[in-house]
């Protein structure tokens, strides 16, 4: 089998370190050999160099080749899977608009480089935050890359929602299907269990049994489940003293794996074509499926008033973010 060229940005960072060894071990693409291209900024090269030495020491049978560079054109040359993890974190005193602009300054040029030198079949997932709007900037900078090849990661939110349901219902995560995450990868996201099933039974029914009625279940969803999933990143920081790393890396692998090998249902942020009234071009999380050729929004699901209102709130935030980067002349 020909190796697949995988480019990882931010390879010297925490998530990069958690991802590299699992990619090379075959956790993302099965037994397909991989050629790794690692992109870092000059300050991050030394740390990434250390990871490259360790990769060598693992002697992974599937690892074809590794190259580390600080030049996006070299890193994205022939790229088939792009994992865009490297981003500018929020510094002290930095406003959200400054953060958006700083990251637009990264994802704009990376989009241009991908458009110029990546393989025709490239698939891109943006992990670095603010992920949805970074992906929007990237898409605007790479007009020749088909929109359905550009996604942003909300799989971690999806998996967090499954994890919370698993605990509440006392069932294995593997028994839970059809959870949906709508909107932005931020505190406004809407993790939705309306269509979810656990061991084949509707989750809303199981929650009503667990909490003693449908109203009590809705209260649990509104007061505990939704905020806990949406603010889980902060909870991890408070408890662990550092942001989510292994779970973010795991979600990234599952996102690519399911897109590549196919899935009937997961959540991902994709470029909207107007589905569910989300303005075209916004990068918004939806329930999606893949037949192996890329994520498609699962259409036709009924949205009740509560869901509509929450989705609209998150979409309004995405529009504000889009306007902020538009003000900087990048989209
Ligand atoms: P980190 O700070 O440990 O690593 C980031 C790395 O990116 C650093 O080594 C830095 O040098 C590098 N970098 C910065 N600008 C770059 C550029 N222009 N090109 C290439 N590399 C560049 O951060 P960590 O913990 O690895 O997180 C990475 C990103 O992932 C953050 O933006 C974080 O907020 C985001 N994240 C997203 C999640 C999601 O669900 N979408 C979940 C968790 C984290």
Image (cartoon, rainbow, N blue to C red):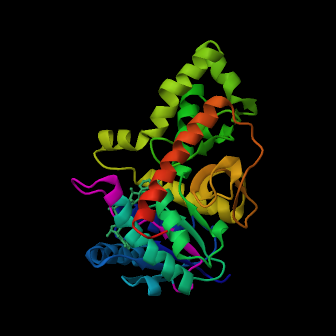
Quarter containing ligand 1?
bottom left
Residue at left offset 58%, top offset 41%: 312
Say if the magenta span includes residue 143.
no
- Residue 15 occupies quadrant: bottom left
Q: Residue furthest left?
A: 92
Residue 164, x across and y down, in percent:
53, 34
Question: Depth check: 280 or 68 in front?
Answer: 280
Name the quadrant containing residue 241: top left
Q: Residue at x 51, y 33 (%)?
A: 226
Describe residue 240's horizontal placement relative to residue 169 as left or right. Answer: left
The stretch of residues the image draws in magenta is: 77-98
Report whether 32 appears left or right of 57. right
Please report the residue visible at 48 percent of the width from the left and 47 percent of the height from the top. Answer: 317
305 to 288, vertically: above or below: above
- Coordinates of residue 103 in the picture (x, y in percent): 38, 65
Give the quarter of the image for residue 94. Answer: bottom left
């Amino acid at each position: 089998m020909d190796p697949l060229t995988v480019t990882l940005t931010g390879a010297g960072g925490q998530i990069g370190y958690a991802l590299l060894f699992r990619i090379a071990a075959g956790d993302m693409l099965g037994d397909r050999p991989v050629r790794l291209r690692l992109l870092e900024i000059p300050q991050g090269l030394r740390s990434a160099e250390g990871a490259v030495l360790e990769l060598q020491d693992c002697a992974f049978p599937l690892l074809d080749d590794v190259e580390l560079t600080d030049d996006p054109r070299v890193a994205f040359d022939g790229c088939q899977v792009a994992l865009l993890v490297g981003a500018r974190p929020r510094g002290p005193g930095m406003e959200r608009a400054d953060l958006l602009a700083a990251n637009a300054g990264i994802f704009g040029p990376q989009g241009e480089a991908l458009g110029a030198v990546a393989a025709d079949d490239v698939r891109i997932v943006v992990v670095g935050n603010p992920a949805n709007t970074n992906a929007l900037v990237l898409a605007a900078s790479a007009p020749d890359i088909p929109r359905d090849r550009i996604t942003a990661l909300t799989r971690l939110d999806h998996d967090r929602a499954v994890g919370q349901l698993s605990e509440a219902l006392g069932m294995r995560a593997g028994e839970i299907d059809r959870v949906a995450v709508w909107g932005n990868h931020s505190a406004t996201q809407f993790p939705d269990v309306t269509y979810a099933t656990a061991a084949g039974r509707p989750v809303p029914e199981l929650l009503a049994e667990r909490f003693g009625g449908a109203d009590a279940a809705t209260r649990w969803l509104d007061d505990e489940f939704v905020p806990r999933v949406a603010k889980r990143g902060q909870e991890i920081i408070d408890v662990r003293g550092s942001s989510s790393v292994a779970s973010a890396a795991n979600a990234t692998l599952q996102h690519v794996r399911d897109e590549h090998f196919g899935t009937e249902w997961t959540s991902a942020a994709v470029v909207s074509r107007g589905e569910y009234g989300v303005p075209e071009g916004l990068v918004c999380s939806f329930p999606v499926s893949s037949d192996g050729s890329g994520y498609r929004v699962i259409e036709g699901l009924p949205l009740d008033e509560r869901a509509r209102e929450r989705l609209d709130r998150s979409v309004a935030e995405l529009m504000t973010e889009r306007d902020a980067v538009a003000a900087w002349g990048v989209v």
